[in-house]
Amino acid sequence: MPLFEIETDSHIIITWANDESAARGVVRESYPRETPLRVTRRPRDCWVISKAALGITGGVDVCHTARDCLAKAAGDKLHAIRLYMQETGADLERARKVIESNMVMGW
């Protein structure tokens, strides 16, 4: 079954589907108020995200550090962002992105 990448105004959805029509159906079912802007059949059956493209380089385990900061801050996002900035030297925007993405993953 092919892997599709479907972009809407708010999401990029990665899903397996039999064809493009079925991939668009995933969006209709999951996000009925959103319209697919772009549907791309991926050339392989896996999805790879480059850490360098996301700005994750070096030996720091970004997720571990972010989750540790969230735990220390008892889930308080602003406090966790401050802690992350202190521990890693990241700027505000980078720290916000890392903390928020780890909150979504259920730290």
Image (cartoon, rainbow, N blue to C red):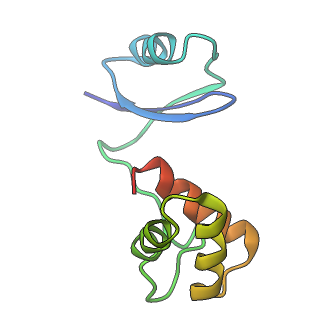
Depicted 86 relative to depicted 3: above or below? below
Name of the residue lying farthest toward the left = 1
Depicted 59 relative to depicted 2: above or below? below
The residue at 29%/42% (across/down) is: 45
Q: Provide residue 56's location: percent of width, then percent of height.
A: 53, 75
Quarter of image, res 31 = top right
Looking at this view, is 23 or 88 the one in front? 88
Q: Provide residue 21's location: percent of width, then percent of height.
A: 44, 11
Q: Provide residue 33's location: percent of width, then percent of height.
A: 63, 12
The residue at 61%/20% (across/down) is: 36
Depicted 36 relative to depicted 42: above or below? above
Depicted 27 relative to depicted 100: above or below? above
Name of the residue lying farthest toward the right = 92
Left or right of 56 in this view: 85: right
Quarter of image, res 76 = bottom right
The residue at 38%/49% (across/down) is: 47
Looking at this view, is 50 or 106 the one in front? 106
Quarter of image, res 44 = top left
Q: Provide residue 72's location: percent of width, then percent of height.
A: 47, 73
The residue at 59%/86% (across/down) is: 88
Looking at this view, is 82 or 2 the one in front? 82
Q: Quadrant of the C terminus?
A: bottom left
Number of numbered discs on residues = 0
Q: Quadrant of the N terminus?
A: top left
